Amino acid sequence: MKVLVATTNPGKIREISDILSETGITLVTPNELGLALDVEETGATFVENAVSKAISWYRASSLPSLADDSGLSVDALQGRPGVLSARFAGPGAGDSANCELLLNLMEGQKDRTARFICVVALAISEATVITARGEYEGSILAQPQGGNGFGYDPVFFDPASGKTFAQLSGAQKNERSHRRLALMALRQKLVTQCLVRVP
Ligand code: ITT
């Protein structure tokens, strides 16, 4: 099955490609097709945004399109930044500005529990979109640590490894992340519906 990785985020493309490399799914990137698309994210939920991105890229490419809408949900901030994670510090804000704003808001907070959430949506036609969700719980540090990954990885402490996601190698993060859990759940749905074979 040939699938378009329907995202403009290079960190996501890298992780999705690595995680799915062990499946029978062949991925193509927007760059490889010479496609560029800016899908406005107006949904109130990860599912709404993921489905809307998957359908938009499907329309543009006529290929099965796999979108990812994801973000960080912080308990002490009532789930923020949530669906606004990419633009928490304003439109066009970069990863370090977003992390800095988060750390400022978390100053003095005792409850530092947070979870990464990822919803993947695979559009296989205009009318058929399969979704799956993954969540991974950790906590927010007071200072960034580590240089790997992207987004909020430097401030997200993973209790299982005792490190931030940015201190893990790509392979270590991909062994357990919210993105892996979502993609494996999606793969299971595809296998159940006989859309892919287990290699
Ligand atoms: P596309 O819409 O093109 O896929 P995007 O980066 O705008 O790219 P989202 O709207 O889903 O995607 O926002 C996701 C943001 O959530 C991302 O920019 C990070 O700030 C954060 N995020 C998601 N997954 C993450 C991860 O694994 N590690 C760190 N931060 C993550």
Image (tube, helix red, strand yellow):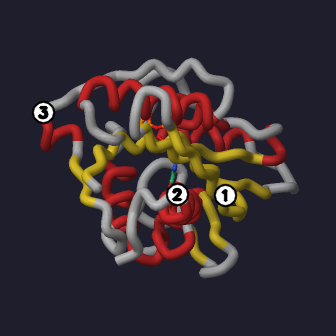
Residue 90 image point, x, y percent: 52, 23
Q: Does label 1 or label 2 sit earlier along the sequence?
A: 1
Closer mark to the observer between disc 1 and disc 2: 2
Specify few, some or many for label 1: CA neighbours under 10 Å numbering under 14, 14-19, or 20 or more: many
Cα–Cα gap, marks 3 and 2: 31 Å
Residue drawn 86% across the image and 55% down it: 111
Residue 18 image point, x, y percent: 34, 67
**Three-letter amino acid code at the position of disc 3:** Gly
Closer mark to the observer between disc 3 and disc 2: 2
**Three-letter amino acid code at the position of disc 1:** Glu
Q: Is residue 54 above or below residue 95?
A: above
**Three-letter amino acid code at the position of disc 2:** Gln
Which residue carries the number 3 mark?
34
Cα–Cα gap, marks 1 and 2: 23 Å
From this viewpoint, which residue is outermost toward the front? 194
Residue drawn 63% across the image and 57% down it: 134
| Left or right, 60 with reference to 76 | left
Which residue carries the number 2 mark?
193
Q: Nearer the viewer, residue 60 or 100?
A: 60
Which residue carries the number 1 mark?
135
Quarter of image, res 144? bottom right
Residue drawn 45% across the image and 43% down it: 122
Residue 175 image point, x, y percent: 50, 75
